[in-house]
Image: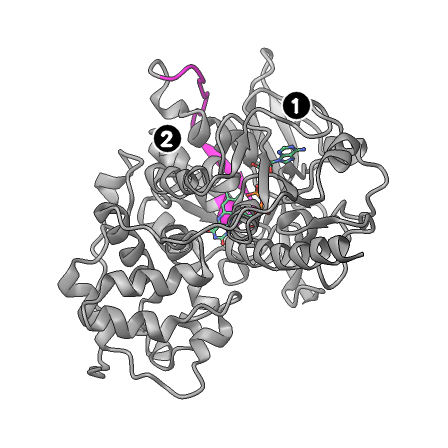
Amino acid sequence: MIKLGGTRVPMREQKPEERIKNFKSVPLGYSEEEVIKEAQRCIQCKGLPCETECPINMKILEMIREIANRNFKRAFFIIKEDNPIPAITGRVCPQENQCEGVCPPYKRGHGINIGKLEAFVADWAREKGIKEEFHIKKTPEKVAVIGSGPAGISCAVDLRKFGFQVTMYEALHKAGGVLQYGIPAFRLPTEVVDYEIQYLDEIGVDIKLNFFVGQNIKFNELREEFDAIFLATGAGAPFFMDIEGESLKGVYSANEFLIRVNLMKAYKFLDFDTPIVCKGPVGIIGAGNVAMDAARCALRLGVEKVYILYRRTKKQSPARDEEIQHALEEGMLLKELISPKKFVGDEDGWLKEVELFQMELGEADKSGRPRPIKIEGSEFRLKMNTIVEALGSMPNRLFLSRAPELEVNKWGQIKVDHNLMTNIKGVYAGGDAIRGNATVILALGDGRKAAQSIRKYISSKSRS
Ligand SMILES: Cc1cc2nc3c(=O)[nH]c(=O)nc-3n(C[C@H](O)[C@H](O)[C@H](O)COP(=O)(O)OP(=O)(O)OC[C@H]3O[C@@H](n4cnc5c(N)ncnc54)[C@H](O)[C@@H]3O)c2cc1C
């Protein structure tokens, strides 16, 4: 393989002034010639740091070699061995902290664009209708997977490949978890998610939608019916600031705001039933990926002034560099070192102002970032007609209250051992349900690990 080195092949994107008028993908993807050129830049360094840093240890170098030789089909099969949803991870993984971050030319700003190579190959296979072929040996054992986000998907796929009968329960009317309801289509197009979900049907996973375990069926009934259970219920219950005025009209949690926009398609209101009231100025509280997604959705809903209200500074923001960059290009405004004290409403109960404290940075806290400290007496007000709180989330309390025997930690995350088994024999858990707010690739890795553990558990049961 040629080792060209050199600078990164630029990714074509929709221009900011165009893209804030639509929800279509911002990156336009590589052409065949561009993707080959980008792959040929790889210097194939020893020790494969990119693969070591990948949480699921994908065979990245083999994929790159095949792309460089224009063998896209082979590249696709190589990725699929480790990753059931490459079109998704290629788009949303924080590659700068993983595979690309350890690629030697990354320090010069020119690491191999591994995520975009992966997404190209997966999109190419989708367009050509190329699928993995495998023979499923049927076994009588039944496994229930609760939740259809990345953890549930990867576990269900592997369990089917092992031959088990798999039933997946999903509370919402569409499968995909955060991939479907949280991450907006301009970052992760809906047709990409739908295609990856369709694969579950094709390999024979029985998906039951609109089915909340703990409500439509008791958790203990499932335990009787199935040989093992995987809990992939995510962390969909938002944290709130718990301050005065939070129940005013115009104050949303990021979950509600993003579900309305992405899953219920409120931006196409009238064609779709769900409306959204999003009057400017809009303030987003928080500065992670979820906050950036909410800000960029608000801009696409036509709001002129969208502010990130952040208690630290841009340098400490947990959002991906690419997301902050894209949001700033689109017109998002960043107000640093401020934190809300209360929300103030008008006589009709609509939000009209936010009262905020000025903050300063102190010593580093457990996260390694400087602790934000309120400056007493610094209160001031900003006119805001909409607030979206993007403060993180925790596992669903309703489900946990219906499964009281499950052990959880103080944040409501399900406790597991090193095999991802909970305190209940035969019941496993993974993804955000055990980690809080994590990433797609970590959830996917948990799903795969749990599938292996379930296989061992079921075979030990049938031997005894
Ligand atoms: C707005 C947003 C943007 C993000 N951006 C990124 C990003 O760019 N990159 C990245 O890597 N990560 C990102 N993340 C994080 C990532 O999406 C999550 O870490 C990942 O989706 C967790 O996967 P999961 O399978 O554990 O749970 P989820 O994706 O949350 O799926 C859980 C599913 O379980 C269902 N469920 C819950 N309880 C029940 C029940 N009792 N019965 C039936 N079904 C149930 C839920 O309805 C949901 O569909 C983002 C998250 C959000 C919210």
Label 2 residue SS: loop
Q: Residue at position x 68%, y 22% from top?
A: 216
* Above or below for 141 versus 371: above
Q: Quadrant of the N terminus?
A: bottom left
* Residue 185 seen by the camera: yes
Residue 245 relative to residue 317: left or right: right
Residues rendered magenta in the picture: 272-291
Cβ atoms at labels 1 and 2 below 8 Å apart: no
Q: How many marks?
A: 2
Q: Main secondary structure of the magenta part?
A: loop
Label 1 residue SS: loop
Quadrant of ligand 1: it is top right
First in residue order: circle 1 vs circle 2: 1
* Figure quadrant of residue 363: bottom right
Residue 109 screen position, x and y as percent: 33, 73
- Three-letter amino acid code at disc 2? Val
Residue ranking furthest to the left: 33
Residue 194 forms part of the magenta stretch: no
| Residue bearing mark 2 | 303
Q: Residue at position x 43%, y 67% from top?
A: 96
- Three-letter amino acid code at disc 1? Ser
Q: Which mark is residue 247?
A: 1
